[in-house]
Image (cartoon, grey):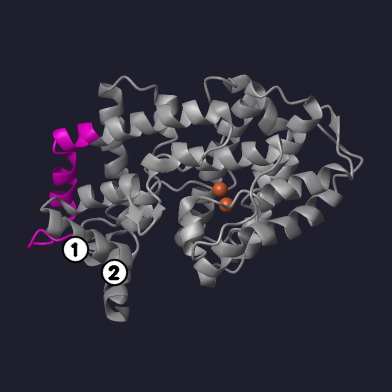
Amino acid sequence: MIIINKIINMVNELIKPITPEKKTDPAEQKKPETNEVGQSNMEKINEDFQELLDIRLAKYKEDIGLKENESDPAKEAAINNLETHNGIVLGYGAELAEEMNLSDEDKTVVLTALMLHDIGKLNNPGDSFGTLKNHHRIGEEYTEEIMQEFVGKKIGEIVITEEMIPRIKQAIARHMNHPFMVMLNKGERYPEPETDIDKIVFDADMMANAGFKNVAFRITGDKFLEEDAATAEKKNISHIEATFDNVLEGVVGSFRIGVKYLPEAVLTEPSKSKTSEIVAQVLQIRDLMKDNDAFQNIQSQFADDEGKLTALSIAMKGGADILKKRINEEIQKAAIKLKIDSKVTKNFLI
Ligand SMILES: [Fe+2]
Ligand SMILES: [Fe+2]
């Protein structure tokens, strides 16, 4: 595997000048747009919370070890992926906060918790599963430290008080029971959401996972690539289709981890209907991609001479980022045919 990785790195070096990648500076904060909250409201939220968003980005850079003016595509990609996720979570959460008629003060608490819910996620990146299982605890620690500096100061029109901090931390501590996380935690559930604020953060995070996001993990991890190759062979379908099926319909033992099952996991009334709507759209996109042979076409483009998709074949055909771009193109193409709003589709991309 070390040799393969070396070859992959060499190939990536060689193809760099041929396929220049558009770099996104992690400093460019993602500005989520949603229909219900409206673009101008999201802009106001991002403006009011700019200082907090800057602190979050600085913390991610510090945790992953990305120095000022340093260029490291892998670390930048990890930060960008997380910032994209944060933006989607914020968009859904802000919408829920409106629908559930929270007071202005509670809205500030929930928006802060939404922004900081994954603040601990890049701590100790060498041990990703260890960190993943514990990122709520690290998040609570960081939040205490960060929010103490805001006490007595205003965010938007609201003065931050000492009393708000434990409520923000509680929501962060209680956002962890995604079915995949419970499976990783050997079936033991994390603390359950109690208040509306906890539930909004939890639900928004679930909804942000209701797209094709995890396809990106499966096409970049050796273990997942092997697993999906075996499923594809068993079911006589393309590898890419097997990956999509796993992400959307995956069941491991008693854990229903697929996107399809997320409507069962969300807690608030508005999220239940919204998540069902999102999941229906995601499944329609998958079905149309299948009907249009999109999976087969992507597979042929990135497979080796024997038609197999491996880390090496992906690297030889342009790399994982090009493959992701290609998958996103097909998702968008299908979504346009299904007349799904592009702002909605944006939340589904990988
Ligand atoms: Fe999280
Ligand atoms: Fe999250």
Helix, strand or loop at mark 1: helix
Q: Are marks 1 and 2 in contact (CB under 8 Å)?
A: no
Residue 100's disc is: none
Residue 61, how many percent across, how many down?
62, 59
Question: In front here: 93 or 173?
Answer: 173
Q: Is residue 79 magenta?
A: no
> What residue sits 27% from the left and 54% below the top?
18
Q: Amino acid at mark 2?
A: Ile
Q: Which element type, helix, strand or loop, lies under badge 2?
A: helix
Vertical position of residue 164 compared to residue 37: above or below: below
Residue 298 sits inside the magenta stretch: yes
Q: Position of residue 136 (x, y in %)?
A: 65, 57
Q: Nearer the viewer, mark 1 or mark 2?
A: 1
Q: Which residue is mark 1?
A: 230
Question: Taken as a whole, is the magenta stretch helix, strand or loop?
Answer: helix
Q: CA distance from mark 1 to mark 2?
A: 22 Å
The furthest residue to the front: 254
As drawn, the residue found furthest toward the right would be: 152
* Residue 20 appearing in the image: no
Numbered range of the magenta stretch: 287-309
Looking at mark 2, is its residue's CB closer than 8 Å to ligand 2? no
**Residue at x 28%, y 80% (from the top left corner):** 3
Q: Is residue 346 left or right of residue 25?
A: left
In the visual, does 5 lie left or right of 264? left
The residue labelled by disc 2 is: 8
